[in-house]
Image (cartoon, rainbow, N blue to C red):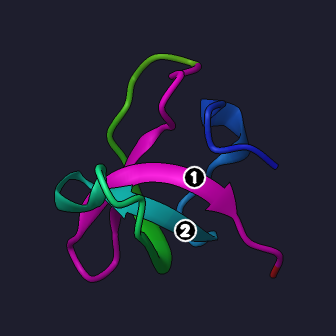
Amino acid sequence: MDGQTRKNIKPGLRVNIVLKKDQRSGTLTQGIVSRLLTKSPTHPHGIKVRLEDGQVGRVKEILPE
């Protein structure tokens, strides 16, 4: 599933995000979604989320359970 559609992402899902500081390198960070921060239904760079550990970034991949 893609991370560009808000309805695909729910708190508790395991995802790979790209942090603001890693946007140039594209380094992914894995974590569990705590909150969705993007209000619009879609975003071309990925829905912005806060992970349970407090990191904020845009979803690149939704990982299988």
Task: Say left or right for 62 vs 30.
Answer: right
Q: Residue at x 57, y 72 (%)?
A: 12
The magenta segment is 42-64
Q: Where is residue 40 shown, x and y percent of the image?
A: 46, 16
Q: Relative to residue 25, is residue 27 depicted above or below? A: below
Task: Say left or right for 22 vs 35.
Answer: left
Q: Residue at x 48, y 38 (%)?
A: 47
Characterize the local packing of mark 1: few (<14), some (14-19) or many (20 or more) Cα atoms within 10 angstroms.
Answer: many
Quadrant assignment, res 3: top right
Q: Where is residue 53 shown, x and y percent of the image?
A: 26, 83
Q: Nearer the viewer, residue 29 or 8?
A: 29
Q: Residue at x 61, y 33 (%)?
A: 4
Characterize the local packing of mark 2: few (<14), some (14-19) or many (20 or more) Cα atoms within 10 angstroms.
Answer: many
- Point out which mark residue 16 bears: 2
Q: Where is residue 29 shown, x and y percent of the image?
A: 42, 76
Which amino acid, by three-letter code, is at mark 1? Lys
The Cα–Cα distance between marks 1 and 2, rounded to whole angstroms, is 6 Å
Does the magenta-highlighted stretch encompass residue 16?
A: no
Q: Relative to residue 34, is residue 38 depicted above or below? A: above
Dots 1, 2 in contact, CB < 8 A: yes
Q: Secondary structure at mark 1?
A: strand
Q: Residue at x 82, y 49 (%)?
A: 1
Which amino acid, by three-letter code, is at mark 2? Asn
- Point out which mark residue 46 bears: none
Please report whichever mark, 1 or 2, sits nearer to the chain's N-terminal start: 2
Q: On the image, numbered disc 1 is attached to which residue?
A: 60
Q: Where is residue 8 shown, x and y percent of the image?
A: 72, 43
Q: Secondary structure at mark 2?
A: strand
